[in-house]
């Protein structure tokens, strides 16, 4: 299972994927914690070197990869909104907020032959939350 996260950068609003890190009181003077997504770069010239670039992200936007892909091969993260299908019929729209939601989705897939597509996420598409059955 690949362990990765995504989050919305504070500096420019872009969404990025990578490793997650958190600094508690980064300067030791009672500041709030800071959240980061770190991206790995590998350089092969002239010898192999690996380095990381970290980007501060909005804490509430951080979501972990669930190890599932939808029927279009898009990675599913916590916070994503999915439509669950039984055959060709759309049956349910659900936000994957926690492990219980993920367990429910896996149960639908493994026990009932369902499939799903990601239609958005709770941060970029809050209007879709009204239609979910949580």
Image: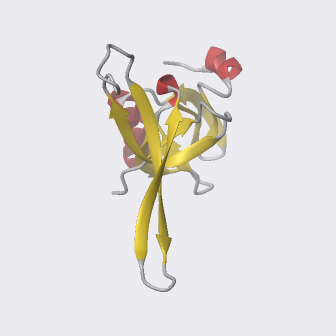
Tell me if residue 47 comes above or below residue 7 in the rendering. below
Residue 105, by quadrant, is top left
Q: Residue at x 37, y 22 (%)?
A: 33
Q: Is residue 48 above or below residue 109?
A: below
- Chosen colour scheme: secondary structure
Q: Would you say 132 lies left or right of 44 here?
A: right
The N terminus - image quarter: bottom left
Residue 72 % position (x, y): 63, 55
- Closer to the camera, 94 or 97? 97
At horizontal 47% and vertical 32% (from top left) the residue drawn is 62
Pick the residue in front: 131 or 5: 5
Percent across and percent down for residue 43 are 50, 74
Q: Nearer the viewer, residue 35 or 109?
A: 35
Q: Look at the image and tell me whether residue 23 can be seen.
A: yes
Q: Which residue is drawn at 29% across and 22% down?
A: 28
Q: Is residue 103 in view?
A: no
The answer to which of 60 and 68 lies nearer the viewer is 60
């Amino acid at each position: 299972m690949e362990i990765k996260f995504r989050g919305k950068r504070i500096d420019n609003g872009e969404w990025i994927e990578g490793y997650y890190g958190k600094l508690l009181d980064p300067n030791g003077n009672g500041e709030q914690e800071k959240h980061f997504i770190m991206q790995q770069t590998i350089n092969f010239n002239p010898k192999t070197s690996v380095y990381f670039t970290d980007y501060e992200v909005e804490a509430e936007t951080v979501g972990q990869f669930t190890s599932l892909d939808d029927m279009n091969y898009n990675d599913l993260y916590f916070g994503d909104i999915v439509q669950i299908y039984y055959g060709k019929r759309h049956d349910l729209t659900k936000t994957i907020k926690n492990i219980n939601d993920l367990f429910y989705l896996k149960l639908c897939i493994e026990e009932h032959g369902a499939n799903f597509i990601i239609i958005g996420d709770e941060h970029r598409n809050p209007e879709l939350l009204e239609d979910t059955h949580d």
